[in-house]
Image (spheres, rainbow, N blue to C red):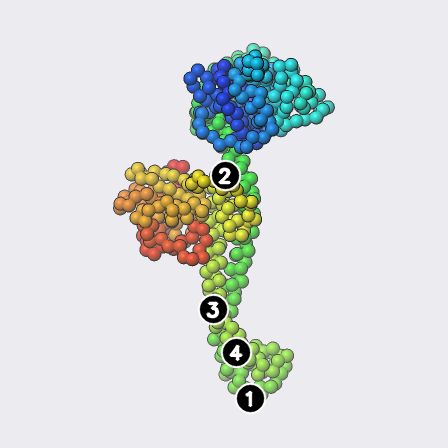
């Protein structure tokens, strides 16, 4: 848990300096768990962000900007009524626990300032927002809770608010370390992450005091990797594997948790999409196997004609009971239940059926091959996509009948935007890469000009890459764009990957082709060893 009690303690102090005496101009819900308080303080506008997500709760200050809020629900309406327009008088941590108390004064109808308190309890699955009157009675809670024997608390309108009981522990800034106890059982605010760091460094009392003092003076956060998982703290930890990133505390916290939320959303969407794609890919592969067998059988049509012709040269055409017959050195299998004449007719039927089926089967094989390439590309795109792009993949699959269509959203007059990846070539030329097939079509047939350049890996499913230049490309830009096309394809881990490139005017999308599928009328090819796009 990166946002442990000590981080909570320091961030509370930093936020308090920013928001004390600020006026709350507007309160809105960004999601069911994220709330924005737009503040004005001494000529400066900022936004206090409170995220009550049970798996990633945090608070920070973010820049003030135009935001789209959800329609107001009951609890937001209460906040509007009781504290919107008021002034934040204090912003403090309760009892060294992960609980915030925000006191707000707002004038009533006769002009008197009436204080209200908003408590934020960052307690895992019990995370909550509780609005309280000056007499300590609860106005309401984001998540109401009836009488609870374990916590001895009731979170309902009219009940008395009580801060959750705190375990008996010590302040690590001043207490003495007892080596017979773990750090987390004797000190407030020590997470398993911090305990692992102190164990690793074998900290005693002086080192703990020094570490905590530095932490409580920090204005940056440090983001690194521990056991393949991203973590952050207010101090650079020795446990960080390799390099770590330093960011200003407020924006750094926001970026870290936004990344976690995106990963969570991506995993949820991927867990729904990947089994569906694998199922359809398996189905298409089986169909391809059957079609290839049918095609092989169809190619035997001339052989069946020869069998029939030879059988009609046999004198006793009405003879039955033969399992095979040899004529002119050729052994012909027979159905013993049928006469020689009827066996000949059967072979003629097989000949005509096979001759007529070859073209139709070949067409079906081509369609299934495209379908397999399409699903193989989707597998790659799901891995590389962000949550917004995964929604577009869902939309794409729904429009083609692979997923059940959702209810139509309310029409938005704003022009639709696509979150395509953007890179810059060594020559400073803008390059765009599609994250999914909807974006691929948008890039090639919507955004790109006819005289700009298109790159795509050869013989593999992959992303469309557009180089926004109508002039001849340098070798450096060609190799740069080709690397992106190879990396964002099924050939990512191959070597000497062929990549085709041409101007957009040479790209065609035949009728019936799926999203992202095109043909190139003319092109050049370059061979590339793909490297990670992050090192581009």
Q: Earlier in the sequence, mark 4 or mark 1?
A: 1
User: Is disc 1 placed on a helix, strand or loop?
Assistant: loop
Q: Are marks 4 and 3 in contact (CB under 8 Å)?
A: no
Q: Residue at x 46, y 63 (%)?
A: 363
Q: Residue farthest to the right? A: 149
Residue 390 visible in image: no
Residue picked out by circle 4: 348
Question: Which element is circle 2 on?
Answer: helix
Instruction: Look at the picture and state if 111 lies above or below 529.
Output: above
Q: Could you tell me if the residues under marks 3 and 2 are in contact, i.e. CB atoms within 8 Å?
A: no
Work out whether mark 2 precedes mark 4 in sequence or the reverse, and give the earlier one. 4
Is residue 411 toward the left or the right of residue 504 in the image?
Answer: right
Q: Nearer the viewer, residue 297 or 44?
A: 44
Which residue is painted at 51% across and 29% down in the image? 257
Residue 447 is situated, as x and y percent measured from the top left of the image, at 37, 44
Q: CA distance from mark 4 to mark 1?
A: 18 Å
| Label 4 neighbour load within 10 Å: few <14, some 14-19, many 20+ | many
Q: Mark 2, mark 1: which one is toward the viewer?
A: 2
Q: Earlier in the sequence, mark 4 or mark 3?
A: 4
The percent coordinates of residue 440 (x first, y second) are 42, 47
Q: Which residue is mark 1?
A: 315
Where is residue 274? Give x, y as percent.
54, 46
Answer with mark 3 or mark 2, whichever residue precedes in sequence.
3
Read off the residue under disc 3. 358
Alpha carbons under labels 4 and 3: distance apart: 16 Å
Question: In front: mark 4 or mark 1?
Answer: 4
Compared to residue 230, the image places residue 351 above or below, namely below
**Residue placed under numbered mark 2 in the picture:** 387
């Amino acid at each position: 848990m990166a946002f442990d009690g000590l981080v909570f303690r320091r961030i509370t102090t930093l936020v308090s300096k920013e928001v004390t005496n600020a006026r709350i101009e507007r309160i809105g819900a960004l999601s069911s768990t994220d709330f924005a308080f737009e503040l004005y303080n001494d000529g400066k506008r900022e936004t206090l962000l409170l995220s009550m997500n049970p798996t990633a709760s945090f608070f920070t200050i973010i820049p003030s900007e135009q935001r789209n809020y959800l329609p107001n629900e009951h609890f937001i309406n209460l906040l509007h009524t009781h504290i919107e327009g008021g002034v934040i008088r204090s912003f403090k941590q309760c009892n060294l626990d992960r609980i915030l108390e925000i006191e707000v004064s707002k004038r009533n109808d006769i002009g008197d300032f009436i204080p209200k308190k908003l408590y934020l309890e960052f307690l895992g699955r019990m995370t909550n927002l509780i609005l309280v009157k000056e007499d300590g009675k609860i106005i309401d809670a984001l998540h109401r809770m009836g009488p609870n024997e374990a916590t001895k608390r009731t979170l309902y309108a009219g009940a008395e608010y009580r801060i959750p009981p705190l375990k008996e522990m010590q302040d690590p800034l001043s207490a003495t370390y007892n080596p017979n106890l773990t750090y987390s059982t004797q000190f407030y605010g020590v997470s398993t992450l911090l305990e692992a760091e102190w164990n690793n460094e074998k900290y005693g009392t002086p080192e703990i005091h020094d570490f905590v003092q530095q932490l409580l003076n920090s204005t940056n956060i440090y983001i690194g990797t521990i056991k393949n998982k991203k973590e952050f703290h207010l101090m650079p930890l020795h446990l960080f594997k390799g390099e770590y990133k330093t960011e200003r505390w407020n924006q750094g916290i926001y970026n870290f948790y936004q990344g976690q939320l995106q990963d969570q959303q991506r995993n949820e969407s991927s867990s729904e999409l990947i089994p569906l794609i694998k199922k359809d890919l398996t189905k298409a592969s089986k169909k391809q196997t059957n079609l290839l067998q049918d095609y092989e059988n169809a190619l035997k049509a001339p052989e069946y004609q020869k069998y029939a012709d030879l059988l009609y040269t046999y004198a006793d055409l009405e003879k039955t009971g033969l399992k095979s017959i040899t004529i002119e050195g050729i052994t012909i299998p027979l159905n013993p239940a049928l006469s020689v004449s009827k066996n000949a007719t059967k072979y003629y039927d097989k000949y005509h059926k096979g001759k007529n089926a070859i073209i139709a089967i070949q067409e079906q094989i081509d369609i299934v091959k495209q379908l397999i390439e399409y699903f193989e590309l989707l597998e790659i795109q799901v891995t590389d996509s962000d949550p917004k792009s995964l929604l577009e993949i869902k939309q794409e699959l729904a429009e083609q009948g692979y997923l059940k269509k959702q209810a139509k959203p309310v029409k938005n007059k704003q022009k639709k935007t696509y979150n395509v990846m953007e890179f810059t070539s060594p020559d400073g030329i803008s390059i765009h890469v599609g994250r999914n097939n909807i974006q691929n079509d948008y890039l090639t047939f919507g955004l790109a000009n006819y005289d700009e350049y298109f790159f795509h890996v050869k013989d593999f499913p992959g992303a469309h890459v557009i180089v926004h230049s109508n002039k001849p490309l340098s070798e450096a830009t060609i190799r740069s764009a080709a690397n992106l096309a190879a990396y964002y394809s099924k050939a990512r881990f191959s070597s000497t990957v062929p990549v085709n490139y041409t101007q957009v005017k040479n790209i065609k999308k035949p009728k019936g082709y799926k999203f992202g599928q095109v043909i190139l009328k003319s092109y050049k090819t370059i061979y590339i060893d793909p490297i990670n796009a992050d090192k581009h």
